[in-house]
Image (cartoon, helix red, strand yellow):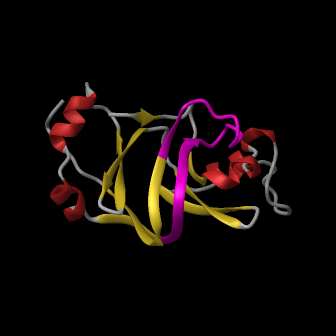
Amino acid sequence: MRSVESLGGPLVLLLEKHLRLWKGIAGSSSSGGKLTTDYDRACAVEDYLGIIQCSHFDVLVLGDEPLRTAWFPHGDAGMFIRWVYPATESSVLKAFTWASANAAAALTELTLSLAGRHRLQDAAAPGDSADGYLAIDVSPGLYQVRSGAIESELT
């Protein structure tokens, strides 16, 4: 299972063809406002999920804590799985099922238009120079994105 985590802040989902616009801690892709960098704007998301603007497009922010995150494709879409404390990645796979994930009470819900190849990466890194990332392909469409919590006794 491929996964990614940040050095301490949120993760961002960027459309690959717009990677060069994301400045991370090096600057801002948007003018105005009090926050001076793209990273600062991503850190301002106070929930597990949020959307911010980068130039003229939406960026999904996986916020709150720097949690290890994996992508599980499912049909034309998929699911991000983030975990807090399991001893091994195999325990995540044992605890996770599509049914349990879909049954989890939604903590946050939002809608996002996605199309093509995206990159999930540390929000601090500039988009065109991130080393640790996950490449994610999705079919063009409007997606419902939600966060939920699943507890498991597996460790």
Up the image or down, 122 lies above or below 112; here it is above
Q: State the image coordinates of residue 18 (x, y, percent, origin top left).
A: 69, 54
Q: What is the span of residues highlighted in magenta in the rendered image?
A: 111-135
| Residue 129, image quadrant | top right
User: Which image quadrant for residue 121?
Assistant: top right
Q: Is residue 121 above or below residue 112?
A: above
**Above or below 5: residue 15:** below
Q: Nearer the viewer, residue 100 or 137?
A: 137
Q: Quadrant of the C terminus?
A: top left
How many labels sit on residues?
Answer: 0
Front in this rendered view, residue 66 or 111: 111
Q: Position of residue 42 (x, y in %)?
A: 64, 51
Residue 131 in the image, given as x and y percentages of width and height = 60, 30
Which corner quadrant holds the N terminus?
Answer: top left
Residue 57 picture quarter: bottom right
Q: Tell whether position 78 is magenta.
A: no
Observer-nearest of 77 and 37: 77
Q: Is residue 10 visible?
A: no
x 29%, y 53%: residue: 149
Horizontally, residue 43 falls left or right of residue 101, namely right
In the rendered view, does 7 fall on the left or right side of 137? right
